[in-house]
Amino acid sequence: MDDFVRNKLVEWGLSELVEKFKDEQIDAESLRVLDDREIDNLIPKAGPRVKFKNNLKLLKEEQNSNQETVNSVQQCEQEHEEAADVVQVLPSTSDTGKRKSDVQSNPSRLQSPAKQQRLSMPGFEESIILSDVKNTMTFVHARLNDQDKLSAFLKKKISDLEIDKRELVGVFGKTGAGKSSLINAIIKEKNLLPSGSVNACTSVMTKVEANTRSSKYEAEIEFITKEEWNDELWSFHQLLDNNENQEKEGDDDYRDAVEKLTALYGEEWKEKSSENLMENKYFKEIPEFLQSRRKILRCESANELSAQFVKYTRSESKQGEGNEGKKWFWPLVKCVTVRVPNNPFLQHVTLVDLPGNGDCNKSRDQMWKGIVGDCSTVWIVTEINRAASDKAAWGILESVSSLIGNGGECQQIHFICTKSDLVDDSDDLSSADIHDQIIKRNIQAKDGVRKEFNKRSKINKHFTDDSFKVFTVSSKEFLKGKHLSPEETEITKLQGFLQDLNDCHSETVNYVNGAYGILSLIEGARRRKEGVGKADDVCKVLEKNMTEQLDQVKKAVEKAIKDFEQCLTEGVKNSKTSEEKLKSFLDRDKQPSFFKTLEAVVRKDGMHKTKKGEHINLNTVLASCLTDSIDEKFRKTFPNDVKGGSFNGVISRFSLDTKSLIQKYQDVKLQLIFLQTEVQDETIQFVSSL
């Protein structure tokens, strides 16, 4: 049984048949030729059998309508045996017993990636192609040994093909803005992420992505280390001891410490030392924390999973009914990854619900910064009634702009105004009047947000007007449709955006392209004697081309370094006045609690949480004169725009001119094809890492 059959059964809602089909060794090829008698034997129960037959019929109809693609798939399947022959006769083996494979006699059977991209690969055909090529490469990988460098190199290249980079969409917003409801509505999972409580907020980074291996709903919980929690406990007790005879009401650090300790220990922490609170008895429900392992939750429904993982992600009032004595484990959690089965919007996309703007825990803060920098799109979520004037929303966007703009992967910012269905005095209005008021306010909100964006120099210096979009959404109306059509809720626009991200991310083309290069190298190595006379000539040309290209890169990098040094020299001069910047939250003359705040900041390696709940990094503030001095040059050198290129595009233009060499040196064509795919892949990876 292969991945294609497993995925199809899960997609059709017949996951209970997976084991049966696995036992009967049903693969993609045999699935397509199953007759009624065989289906009756495989599926005795009428309900699942009828469902299976109907889906199989649709599968065959779609297959017949795309015969050209299917033919290429059948061709790919036949290469299992050929790949084995090629592997068996790698350079380390003798020439005895070699059989001339079809690949050797007909090299054109290894279709070029360009031709493969032109093939129509919608729906199941693309799945079949990917599944069959993966099966071929798995077979080749198994036949390779580790006794020589070439085989070890090939095995690593095949393993690297499985690495599939996902598109990250970061979702920011303060408590009550409606982030969870928004995500639930967009991915059509009403009860997945907990929402609705005014006394609760998401306290842990939560990723939502596709479950590609199972039909179950899963949550993977990653904890901080025991050592990190022990350090936090010590820090909490130091803070609490220092505050014993002082004003506590306005101390955010004090409130945070009490909130975390109470969530995990109830009131018991007040009578215990930090050493006592590390005893194993407090972690009986989460042995994974003590064992430095991840906890996995699996459920049949979104509602069931939500009920189980809520205590790992949310901070909730202990005063609520039913919460007495209940433990909340979120203080120990680093990240939660929720996996949803059969969801087209999450195929290659991960939505990341990001709490606030940073964390005082080092590992959580590092993960937060890493995720933010990797987001290709950022969603800022706020309520529509104060979208343009919401200081928290704009503050979050300003604070993350340097991370997502300078050197980050972010190309778009979506400012999402939620709860557009809420209208004052709606009881006195007709449905038509409510509809008109909603539409009118949506237009006004978008206009107001855009005007505010144009005023925010800290944001728009990183992003152009074209990369900033405003949406007015209503999750409630999308689900109920009382006054607005689905399109008017604009949830469908965000769904379309996610679908576009998935469509642009072609796992099949990337994988087949890489496989094509690897198989070309294997076959070229097998036929190495045919090109011996030309190899030296080709190497000389390649070395010459590489030297010329690297020289261009070197010049561009050296120029950038010189420009940055000039900017930083000016930044050093400006840094002499950085003391003034600290007065916004560390003013000795105006703050009675100056020394207490300074002590807390130093204790947390520069992190500070203001009375408004805003996280400030002292190190970032002190270095801001330097970073500001290189901002403009940095954006030009490392543009976020995918159409541009780092160092004025010199890296993107890097080429060994293998295309023309292939035409001239046919004897080493296959080796050059591999080199061509490698240069493309390495260039993409290098540019992405900048």
Image (cartoon, rainbow, N blue to C red):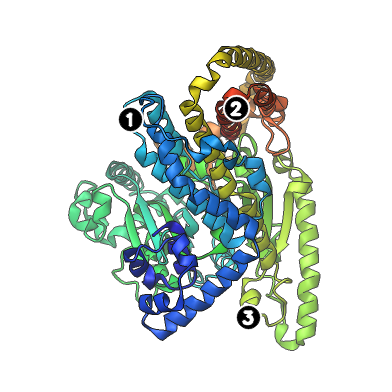
Q: Is residue 185 above or below residue 633?
A: below
- To which quarter of the image does residue 321 belong? bottom left
Earlier sequence position, callout 1 versus callout 2: 1
- Mark 1 or mark 2, whichever is nearer to me: 2
Question: What amino acid is labelled 2 in the image?
Answer: Lys
- Mark 3 or mark 1, whichever is nearer to me: 1
Q: Quadrant of the N terminus?
A: bottom left
Question: What amino acid is labelled 1 in the image?
Answer: Asp
Label 2 residue SS? helix
As measured in the structure, the alpha-carbon distance from the residue carrying label 1 to the one carrying label 2 is 26 Å
Q: Is residue 417 above or below residue 94?
A: below
Q: Which residue is mark 1?
A: 146
Q: Which residue is mark 3?
A: 480
Task: Return the residue nearer the eye: 94 or 421.
Answer: 94
Label 1 residue SS? loop
The answer to whether the residue labelled 2 contacts the one labelled 3, judged by CB atoms less than 8 Å apart, is: no
Residue drawn at 49 percent across, 20 percent down = 529
- To which quarter of the image does residue 57 belong? bottom right
Residue 536 appears at what percent x and percent y?
56, 12
Dot 2: within a 10 Å radius of its alpha carbon, few (fewer than 14), some, or many (20 or more) residues? Answer: many
Residue 164 as seen in the image, left or right of residue 332: right
Q: Quadrant of the C terminus?
A: top right
Residue 669 shows which numbered tag?
2
Label 3 residue SS? helix
Task: Return the residue nearer the eye: 444 or 124.
Answer: 124
Earlier sequence position, callout 3 versus callout 1: 1
Residue 500 appears at what percent x and percent y?
66, 55
As measured in the structure, the alpha-carbon distance from the residue carrying label 3 to the one carrying label 1 is 60 Å
